[in-house]
Image (cartoon, helix red, strand yellow):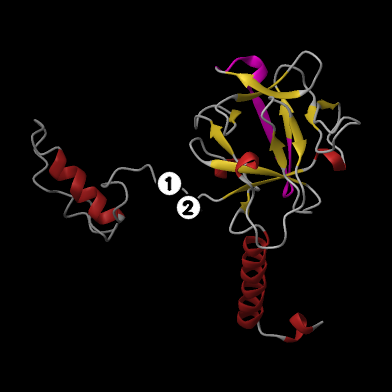
Amino acid sequence: MILKCLPKYFKTQLLASIVSDHTLQQLSIAGGWWKIVDEMDLKGGEHVSFECGSGNGCYLSSLDNGRFTIGLPHPEGEEPSPEEIFAVVKTPDDPKTSFKTGYGKYIGVDSNGALVATAEAIGTRERFQVVFEEGKSAIQAVCNPLFLTMAVDKDGLIYVAAKKAGQEEMVNIRTNAQKTGPVDWRSAEDRKSAKDCTQAYVKMYQHSKVDTKMRAISADVFDMKSV
């Protein structure tokens, strides 16, 4: 193989280039809507679309009667249609997620297992668990532990009725949100270097009854004069 003949540095650069090209290709396929593969990237307030797991450009589509179907395939580079775009309702501390259609209704599951969007408020039927594993994802209902199937029935409608997540239950969850890195929740003092951090906290607590007099820990741990 070519990679075996390359030095480690060039091998790393080549692999990075391949990954970058693959990412750009995925973006162009869906018109800039990239695939979410980690729960951390599924955030409230953003928009998502649900593409069939095969990546055929067909998306879950909401109908004006509150039911759902699978839309026609999109050509490469075209983004999802408005009826195929949903708002995410989710808090960072809750693994459960809800979704809202462009018609202003929340997506849920009725007593027959059909995927519907008729509710104006979120209840148990309007909550879902998105399962991510090895780059694949599936959507499981909370009200009944069944999975959303991305294949229509004889009437062209979508149901949440699968006991196991098979090939037809795989979903490519795509979003056009700007991808950001992990948020650093540390205070400004904690983000400093070890030495600067120590001095910052000494200054912060100078009003204390303990007379520190800027006796910060020296950079040299064997220097006992400053302790």
Which residue type carries mark 1? Val
From this view, report whether residue 122 is shown above or below residue 56.
above
Q: Which mark is residue 62?
A: none
**Do the residues bearing badges 2 and 1 touch, measured as CB atoms within 8 Å?**
yes
Instruction: Say which quarter of the image contains residue 85.
Output: top right
From this view, report whether residue 69 is shown above or below residue 159.
below
Residue 28 versus residue 8: which sits nearer the camera?
Answer: 28
Q: Which residues are magenta?
A: 121-138
Q: Which mark is residue 180?
A: 2
Q: Position of residue 212 (x, y in %)?
A: 12, 41
Q: Position of residue 132 (x, y in %)?
A: 70, 41
From the viewer's perspective, is the residue at label 2 or at label 1 nearer?
A: 2
- Callout 2: SS: loop
**Left or right of 16 on screen, residue 166:** right
Q: Which residue is mark 1?
A: 183
**Left or right of 77 on screen, residue 87:** left
